[in-house]
Structure formats: structure tokens, C-alpha cells
Image (spheres, helix red, strand yellow):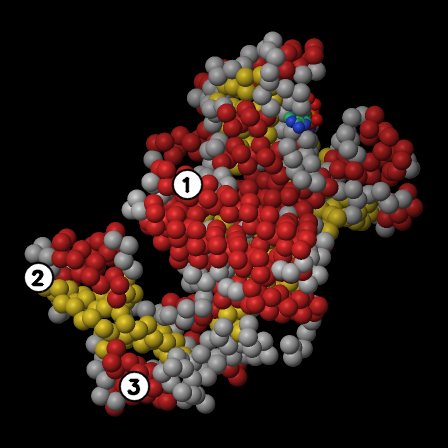
Amino acid sequence: MGRGYTDLKLVLKFGGTSVSSSQNIRNVATLIKKLSKEHKIILVFSAISGVTDDLIRITNLIQNRNKEAASSLAKKIIKMHTDIADQCVKNSKIKKDLLNKMKSDLDEFQDLLHGMLLLGEVTPRSSDYMISFGERLSINLVAFALNEIDVKAVPLTGKDVGIVTDSNFGGAKPLMDTTRLHVSHTVENLLQKKTMAVIGGFAGADQHGNITTFGRGGSDYTATIIASSIKADEVWLMSDVDGLMTTDPKIVKDAKLIKEVSYIEAMEMALFGAKYIHPRALEPLVAKKIPLRIRNTFNVNNSGTLVTATPQADTQKMVKCVSTIRHTGLIDVRGGSMVGAPGTAATIFSILAKEGINIMMISQSPSESSISIIVKKNDLDKAVNSLEMNLLGKIIKKVDVTVDVSIIALIGSGMRGIAGVASKVFTAVAKKGVNVIMIAQGSSELNLAFVVKDSDCNSAVQALHDEFKLGK
Amino acid sequence: MRIILSGFGVVGQSFAKLLLSRSEDLYAKHGLKPRIVGVFDSNGSAASSAGLDLNRLLEVKKKYGSIRKYHNKEKDANGLDMINGMDAEVLIETTPSNYKDAEPGMSHIVNAMKKGLNVITVNKGPLALAFPSLIELATYNQVQLKFSGTVGGGTPILDYAKNSLRGERIVSFQGILNGTTNYILTNMATGLTFKAALADAKKKGYVEADESLDIDGFDAAAKLVILANWIMDMKVTIKDIKRTGIRDVTTGDIKKAAAKDCAIKLVASCERDLVVAPKEIPLDDPMCVNGTLNAITFNSEHSGQQTITGRGAGGIETASSILRDLLDIKQEVSRIEIA
Ligand SMILES: NC(=O)c1ccc[n+]([C@@H]2O[C@H](COP(=O)([O-])OP(=O)(O)OC[C@H]3O[C@@H](n4cnc5c(N)ncnc54)[C@H](OP(=O)(O)O)[C@@H]3O)[C@@H](O)[C@H]2O)c1
């Protein structure tokens, strides 16, 4: 791999693409085998691409009493996995073992489906149980494909390996000290037996043994929880990109790979749309100062982006990247003096939270008695409706909507305490004739975020990328 | 207050006796009316939701060796069944300390906390192997986990460091935390060989059924884990302790130390590392106590060195520390109810 050191304890997390065909699985297995000659490897896998979404869809269909559609979607999932299982292993003995293991997991899946269909009811608990199956199935495929090329490996769910969480289904958090105790025990035992742990991401279990999940992107979180529990040397998040980029290469041709960022910078980037990291995934690493690398499964010679506590000085720039969150909706809430009054923002937050709407950005100007809110485009209609239903005519006089806007954020710890960054930014953007609709308030000093019309987004991003010489 | 008592050996029985002798003043002075609703030992259990008759319990145990004969029944619940099935507020865990997997105490404690029971343990095994996890689970389940009998027995070492030195920063500490090995080393200083001293300690009933727990430093290491977590906020388990016992200490070593006006003691220390090992201690060091005594010296940032000495273990001493914990729990529970 062109790296100067060996025999590291590495936690490798692979995403859904790497298990989405028998060929991909075999390729990944070969890569893992090669790495395992130099390092101690612990694996974390996501579900096959799209499977978790399908499982969520099934729970929705059950809730809506659409039995037929739920069953046929489940059949599709079962067939896909059985087909891949059939193809990804050749050795007849190993294939038989794999198919048996798949069958026993799929039987349980079907039992659960039947139970939920009978009740026509989805609780947060049964939902987590259902949507954790994607990883339960994918790890079998990988473990047996590894067995076939003479790598001893066992599939383990988050529960099996010992991840203990609170009982907050759908967005669980690990009880870290308890998890550390159990996970280190399980993994150390396997390492001693020279057996590779192939761990299903995204899920754990609460203290009573009920399966819980971490929410979207939760497999990253699994990887860092495991790494922190066993004091790994590094975590690698393997995906199909080289790492974090200075900006979206589809917008700016000379966008560059970022070599190193700090944990906080990476968290900010996750917040502003760098979709390769779960927002809480870095928490378990920070205390133990375990570095994380984002790297490309298909381009392993590239060392990717390193996320550490202390990035090398020569990689430090004032601004590290220009990120964008495209196609969001802007809601302007206007009213009398009440709008600017304390507590109003809180009321708006809680109304939107009740609808499950995530506020991406907010800005309030008491003098003009207005509040601006950015939400995801999908949430826009629901958000406007709930604000109108609850507040119009009370503390709100008017709700204005701008449909297609983008958030642009500059991120970098070098901006902290440096005067004039904002004026540099807005001058550069103004030169391109771009109108800034809204500026984020009260955000950290590590980012500067503002909103433009989506049609202005590309030229604004290009201008900033040039201004801060990020392509150099 | 309803209590399940896990284990009915030396400590468990001492506690029952203590309750019998103190029941009136506990009620009058502290408003505490402890009812033992369930007890189990290695052979069986006895239960009564109205509270067991402690005199009878002690008699039955003495006469038959197991409390199982308290009721004349065929089927019998095991400890976990009782913890999971019976209503109570507190579990008192007194089964033997086990440093391999901490069972059965670990399961008793974890299941009790899951069910919302407060826990008092004198069993050091679960704390030695999983202190950070058990504290986390207690916090998560909003129950109290008390263990003042695990270190120093009747000598309130944990309380002293945590409460009396409140606001002070303890930088390091070292102590003689195991009475049995101290007794053996003290006797060796009078010329006895290790073997002879061990045999004598056994005869006096000072040595654990599994002698390795004392001799190889497991007991001292477990206490060091508890102190390091509780007082120094370290998150460690027995795996993090560098542990050497006293098997290889010879009379020659002891003579050599004596020539320097020192004695060899099994010392548990928390400085840069966590270590249990035989060490030379000057005879005039206040920590240099003899016989079965324990001693610990705290080095604090502003108040300098302070040493506490006292009897380390003993059934009745340990039982009294359980009672102390029980009163704390009672106080905390009523504080929460008022608030
Ligand atoms: N003695 C002390 O001075 C002292 C001081 C501090 C801490 N401790 C700790 O306190 C604990 C108890 O000490 P002890 O001196 O009372 O010990 P003990 O006399 O040996 O009593 C242990 C009790 O636990 C019961 N037991 C053993 N295995 C069991 C199982 N699997 N299930 C249910 N019950 C089981 C025993 O049952 P049977 O009666 O049927 O054998 C006995 O009643 C130990 O962990 C010890 O380290 C003791």
C-alpha cells in the first residue's frame, strides 16, 4: 500500500457498494486478505446498497396496511441475497454453510415480517429489529467469501460483538464503558484465534437485548465505536471516493483532495453535507486520539484524507473547503413585534420538530421582525403547512417561501479569530453578481455559512475556491 | 425498604445479626425498616414478601448448612430468578469474589440494576473486572451502586478520600490493602518461612478458600482498581494493574530490608502506573503497619500526606459498612421522593 508502517490494528469499514454484487464481494475479500498480511484487521460492513431503504419502506408499508407490497418487497430482498450468496462462493462445502446461515437469518426475517404484518403495527423497537437485517445478511456474504480464500472470519452483528446502547430506538447512543468492556473481550478473543471479525454496522442492542440502530450512516459510527473499544491504531472508512475534497469536483474542475483535517473540522464538514461521515461518528475517537482515514476501495494507493487531533502544520490553511448543501428551501416568517421576541424561535423549533423536520439553518433579525429558516426541499411543504396551521394569525402575519436555494459553507479552523474573512468572502461573491440571501448566525467560528439561489451556487463556489486558492 | 440478600456466608450472616441487634434504633433514629424479602446461597433460597424471620434464617443456616430448608418446598428459585422475579428496592451482593469472569455476582448486579434495584456489593469481582461499565449502568438506570465494604472493611477509606478530602486533589496514593498477606509478611519478619507463615495464616482462618486471591495479589489489585476509579476518576480494570504477589518473597529478602530499617510489604500504588508488588517500606513510615492491619497514604496537592490505618476486613466490620451504604441509599431515595 506504499505505507511506511505495518502491523497496525485497523478497523476497516466498507460501504454498501462493496457488497452489492458477488464480484464486488470477491474483490473486497481479496483486498482484505492482502491487507491482513500486514495488519490486524477488524471489519465493519454496511448493508447492500439500497437494502436499508427498502427495509424502511417495508415498515412504512406495514404501517399503511399494505400487506401485498410489503411482502413482495421482502421477497425481492430475500431473492437478492440468496442469489448473491449463491454466486459469491464456489467451494461447495463453504457454499452450503453460507446458504444455511443465510436461511436461518432469512427465516427469522420472515417470522418478524409475519408478526408485524399480523399486528399491522410498527413500533420503534420492531422497526429497528427489521431495518437491522440489511447488515445481518451482508456480513454473512463477506465472512464466507473470506473463508473461501483461506481467511478465517466470522460474521457478528453489533449485538453479538457487544455494542450496548441506550433504548433510544432509531437514534441510539452507545453506553461506551459497557460497550468497551464487551467489545474488547469479543474482539481480543477473536484476534487471539487469528479470526477476523466481520461486524455488521448500524446496529447494537440495549441492555435488555433489544436491537437498536444508530440512524443514517450509522455504520461509520459502528466502526469508530469498535475502534475506540479496542484502542485501534486507525479507522479507515472505505468508500468510492478518494477522500474529502476542497469542494464538489462537479462544480469546480480543480477541486483537490484534502490531505488532513482535524476532528472538529471534519465534524463541521459532516454537518455541512460531506456525506461520508456520520455526525456523531468522530466522538468515540476524540478521547483516544485515534486517527481516521477516508479512502477509496478502488484506489487504495491513494492515502485519502486523514482526520486527526493534530493535523500537520503544513497542511493547515485558513479555509479547508467550500461545501454546499444544494436544493434546500427557505422560509421567511414575518409578523409584528412578536416574531423577534424571545421564545418565538423556540416555538417555531418545537412545531417543526414535532413534524420531524430538521432545521438546517436559522437566522433572526429582531428589527425587521422576521425569522428565516432553511429546511430540506422534501420537508418544505410540510414545514410551511405546519407553521401556517399553528402560528398564522397568532404570532405570524406572513410566510414567504423561496423554493430552490443552496447553503454554502466555508470550513476551516484557520478562520478562527482572523478578521476580515467575511468581507473577503462577500466581496468575492458580490463580484460575480451573486446575491446573498441569508447569513448564518451564531454558528461556530470554524465555519461561515450563507445562502444563495441555487442557480447562483456554482459561480459563488467557484469564486470562493479561487479566492482562497484551494486548488493550489 | 425491601432487600434481596445474595449469598449468606460470613458477611451475609453478620449483616443479618447486625439488623437484629440494631432494628429498633434504625427505625427510631433513621426511619429505616429494612425487610429482607429474599435470600439465596449456593444451594437454594428463601423468600417472603412480608420479610423473612432473620433468627430462623440464621438457625436454619447453622443447622442445615443451607437456607433452602427455611421453607419445606420442592422447587426452588435460583439467585437470578429471585432478582428478576421479586419486588425489592435493594440488592446486597455477598457471593465470593471471582476475578476470572466475576460470576455469579456480575449477573446479579447487572440484572438488579436493569430492574431498577439499588445495589450494595461487598463482592469485589464485578468491580475489579468492570468498574466503569457498572457505574455507567447505574447512572443510566438511575440507581445507586454502593461498595464501601470492598476496601478497608470497617475503615472508611473510600469515604475519607472522596468526601473528607473533598475539594482537594489527590495526586497519588499507596497502601497495604490486603490483611492476609500483611500477616504472612509480618510473621516472616520474625523468621518464619513463607510456607510456614502461610500455613499459620490458614489455621487462623485469614486466607481465602482460593489462597491465590490473597497470595498472588488479586485482592489487593481489585481494591486498587476500585480506588483508582472512584478517587482518581481513572477508567481502569484489573487488566490494567501490574500485579506481583508474595510467593517469591524469601526470608533473605526480608533480612536485607531489615538491615536498611525497612520491612517488605505488599504495596498497591497509584502513581504513574497502577502496581501491586512487594516493596521495601521504612519502619518509621506511618504506613508500615503489622499483622492483619491495613494502611493507606494519600498524597494530596495542598494537605500533603495523610495516612489512615485500621482493620481491613472481618464479617461484622463489613456488615457495618453495608448498613452505612443502606442508610445512604435510604437518604438518597427520600431526597429524590421529596424533590
Ligand atoms: N469476609 C470479609 O471480611 C470480607 C470483607 C470484605 C469483602 N468481602 C467479600 O464479601 C464476599 C463474601 O465474603 P464472605 O466472607 O461472606 O464469603 P463466604 O463466607 O464464602 O460466603 C459466600 C456466600 O455466597 C454463597 N455463594 C457462593 N456461590 C454462590 C452461587 N453461585 N450462587 C449463590 N450463592 C453463592 C455461599 O453459599 P454457601 O453458603 O451455600 O456456600 C455463601 O453463602 C466476598 O466477595 C468477599 O471477597 C469479605
Q: Nearer the viewer, residue A332 or A2?
A: A2
Q: Earlier in the sequence, mark 2 or mark 1?
A: 1
Q: Chain of mark 1?
A: A
Asked whether residue B85 appears in the rendered view, the answer is yes
Asked if residue A393 lies left or right of residue B169, the reply is: left
Residue kind at label 3, given as amino acid type: Ser
Task: Determine if marks 2 and 1 fall on one subunit.
Answer: yes
What is the number of the mark on residue A459? 3
Which class describes the residues within 10 Å of circle 1: few (<14), some (14-19), or many (20+)?
some
Q: Chain of mark 3?
A: A
Q: Circle 1 — which element?
A: helix
Q: Nearer the viewer, residue A257 or B96?
A: A257
- Judge depth for marks 2 and 1 and give the one in front: 1
Q: Quadrant of ligand 1?
A: top right
- Indicate the position of residue B226 as horizontal and vertical percent values: 62, 43
Q: Quadrant of the C terminus of chain B?
A: top left
Query: Which residue was labeled with disc 2?
Result: A397
* Mark 2 Cβ inside 8 Å of ligand 1: no
Which class describes the residues within 10 Å of circle 2: few (<14), some (14-19), or many (20+)?
some
